[in-house]
Image (spheres, rainbow, N blue to C red):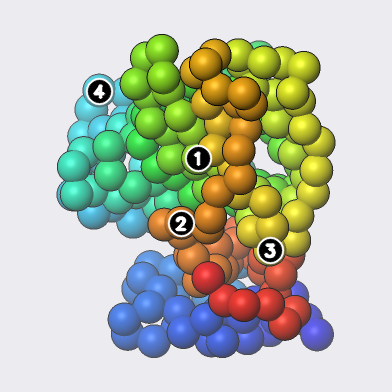
Amino acid sequence: MQPRRRLLKALAAAGLLGPAGISGLIRDALAKGDVPIKAGLQKISGEVIVNHKLATEGQLIKPGDTVVTGRGSEAIFVVGQDAFMQRELPTVSFGAEAVQNLMRVVSGRILSVFGKGARTIQVSTATIGIRGTGCYIEEENYGAKARTYFCLCYGEVELTPTAAPKEVERYSTVHHDKPMYIHNDMKMPKMMVPAEVINHTDDELTLLESLVGRVPAFYGKDYKKY
């Protein structure tokens, strides 16, 4: 099956091509065959700030930039072969040229899909090395008792908790197989504990992958839908 036809089939199956689904900008781009679509902010809801200035749709997100979304706000954007859905109240910084494969999540919630190659995500409780990945992060920064929710939706990861580097785990998933809470509370017996799948969906991952001309790793397989 041709890549674009495969992509459209996946979007239709996820219900993202109807009026209540995929945004007009993305739908129009697909209709014109413009897949992947251009990099930058694809959709803004509420207040989105890039480098201390109000952002506008179409604005590029570049290495070294910091993206902040306000309460009740959301931003969907593309950086190269990576796509992001940034929920309310996160602060996310992208590495400058020398470390442009680095993303730092300071606070809040973000769903991300990444192209080929290694990336590093820094959160308050861990260093997360990923490859070919879709992942969801909720950063709960409470100082000495910070906690991070991390779901490797698919792909490969090396997960190193800051408070206990020897607990490093390397694993791969295909469909939300091992969500984790990562802690930095030294009173806990382990820094990483199992969690449930929360606050992100397969349809959202399908939407993000569509922005960069791909489908999720679980597409076409018989899994319970999240």
**Percent x, y of residue 173:** 75, 55
Task: Using the numbered discs, state the Cα–Cα distance from disc 4 to disc 2 in whole angstroms.
Answer: 30 Å
| Residue at screen point 43% across, 51% down | 85
Q: Which residue is mark 1?
A: 149
Along the line of sight, the residue nearer the viewer: 30 or 32: 30
Task: Using the numbered discs, state the Cα–Cα distance from disc 1 to disc 2 in whole angstroms.
Answer: 9 Å
Along the line of sight, the residue nearer the viewer: 189 or 152: 189
Along the line of sight, the residue nearer the viewer: 88 or 192: 192
Q: Which residue is mark 3?
A: 175
Q: Answer yes or no: do the residues labelled 2 and 3 have beta carbons within 8 Å?
A: no
Image position of 90 (left or right of 34): left
Q: Which residue is mark 4?
A: 52
Which amino acid type is shown beneath numbered disc 2?
Ile
Image position of 197 (left or right of 20): right
Which badge, 4 or 1, is on the more N-terminal residue? 4
Task: Using the numbered discs, state the Cα–Cα distance from disc 4 to disc 3 in whole angstroms.
Answer: 36 Å
**Percent x, y of residue 223:** 68, 77
Q: Answer yes or no: do the residues labelled 1 and 2 have beta carbons within 8 Å?
A: yes
Viewer-side label of 4, 1: 1
Image position of 157 (left or right of 21): right
Q: Which residue is mark 2?
A: 198
Helix, strand or loop at disc 1? strand
Against 16, residue 72 (above or below) is: above
Which badge, 1 or 3, is on the more N-terminal residue? 1
Along the line of sight, the residue nearer the viewer: 62 or 161: 161
Which badge, 4 or 3, is on the more N-terminal residue? 4
Against 92, residue 200 (above or below) is: below
Which amino acid type is shown beneath numbered disc 1?
Tyr
